[in-house]
Image (tube, helix red, strand yellow):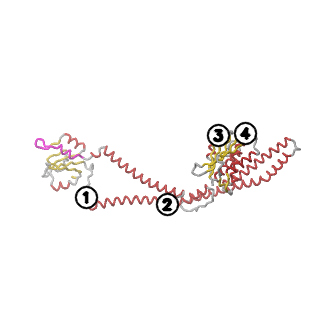
Amino acid sequence: MNTIERFFRRYIFSTIGIITLFFAVNLLLLGSFFIIAYLSGAADSNFPIEDFSSHIVFEDGKLAADTQALETLHASNAWAMVLNDDGAVIWEEALPEKLPRKYTATDIAMFSRWYLDDYPVNIWKRPDGLLVIGFIPGSVSNHYISTNTAYIWPLCIGIIIAFIINILLMVYLFIRNARRIEKSMEPILNGIQSLSRGKEFHLEEKGELAEINAGLNRAGEYLIKKDDTRAEWIRGISHDIRTPLSVIFGYACEIEDDLNLPLSTRKQAKSIRQKSENLRALIADLNLTTKLEYSMYPLKKKSVNAVELARQVASEFLNELPEQYELEISTDNADRLILLNGDDSLLHRMLSNLINNSIVHNRVGCKITLYVELDIESDVDTCIFTIIDTGCGISDSRLDSLNNATPISSTQEENISIDHGLGLKIVQQIVKVHHGIIHFIKNSPHGLIVKISLPLM
């Protein structure tokens, strides 16, 4: 599953999650409403007609309501009457004057449907007749519903099916819209991925997202043009400088070696030669880092003996190493062949840059140790190069920048030479093209440790 499919699958799942959350929240709110209504006494809001009827009793040969019944009636702003079997009112309380005091069987049958002359009523059968409780018009809503039982189950099933169909329709519409967005966004996301890799691309500038496609096309053309201009500029500068630099270097060597010239002149020529060498190395580094950055360097991978490679690099430095420096090589697996699949010239350059970095930035001298070991405890067998120096080390902020591969700033401090940034950048690029890992650590009590892990063949 690629990144685009994973993105839109998460979108669909999040949509389903939103729908589920929507219904869960609504069920929770509905449940909360019923709980609050129950706690607020909504269950007791209906008139307690049965209890009220029990408080109407015969006293001195006639019906009478006690104080509690009257308070209940007045609290509900209602009136009451009791009809005997002949339909005559034998007891009343707050009965409106406009209502009759005798009712026929037809009248009773009509208001038993819950309304008496616009007054909503409740009725209750008593041993001595019929109790009728009336309320103010509009204060209570009574409804009569009569449904054939043959329609009950089909109605319930129909409601459930309609609910499920609505849910499925909603999910379908969400997925359909997501697919439409995916089809529109897929070229854009692919274009962004190509842009991040520095590859050329072109999006069709039509449809709803035509403006975005056009903007990405312009951005891609600008960045590629900018990168091409940068690479061309570096190649042009390198070519234009190479010839005059060779002339300067050659004349400086001749002047330095001419014993007939004054010593001060020969020292100046030596300084010119050294700076020319530094400038030539800088140009080579610029060319190399540009090729590595834009994948223009033709990798020539082959089987490389890691221990032999380290010995070659160390021997080159030992031949011209100043006396204030000490360089040694060590391995914990001398009896085992450690073979890498890599470009030996790049790997050689990687170790050379790290050792040279320790020399350049520790002018007073230090001890440099190059370890080569085999890590068989990890999931994949790896070769570990460890370069340790006992020099002055680097700051915490610089250490974090190196470990996070932060780009070298053009406004870096003047005491940090270009070689310090460019040399280590090339090392990081070489490790990257070999699918390795590099880590910078502070050496105790002072100095720097650089650990590089590279996969074996």
Amino acid type of the residue that numbered disc 3 sits on in the rendered structure = Asn
* Rendered image: mark on residue 365: 4
> What is the distance, in whole Å, between disc 4 and disc 1 at their CAs?
104 Å
Q: Which residues are magenta?
A: 47-63
Question: What residue would you read off at disc 2?
Answer: 179
Q: Secondary structure at mark 3?
A: loop
Of the residues tagged 3 and 1, which is closer to the observer?
A: 3
Residue at x 49% of width, y 58% of height: 178
* In this picture, residue 183 sits left or right of residue 34: right
Depth check: give the residue in front, 106 or 395.
395
Occupied quadrant, residue 226: bottom right
CA–CA distance in space, label 4 to label 2: 65 Å
Q: Amino acid at mark 2?
A: Arg
Q: Residue at x 82, y 45 (%)?
A: 269
Q: Which residue is mark 1?
A: 146
Tag nearer the camera, 4 or 1: 4
Counting from the top left corner in percent of width and height, residue 419 is at: 71, 46
Residue extending farthest to the top is: 445
Report how far apart the C-alphas of labels 1 and 2 lie in the structure: 48 Å
Element type at mark 2: helix
Mark 3 or mark 4: whose residue is earlier in sequence: 4
The three-letter amino acid code for the residue at tag 4 is Gly
Q: Is residue 407 visible?
A: no
Mark 3 crowd level (few <14, some 14–19, many ≥20, 10 Å Cα): some
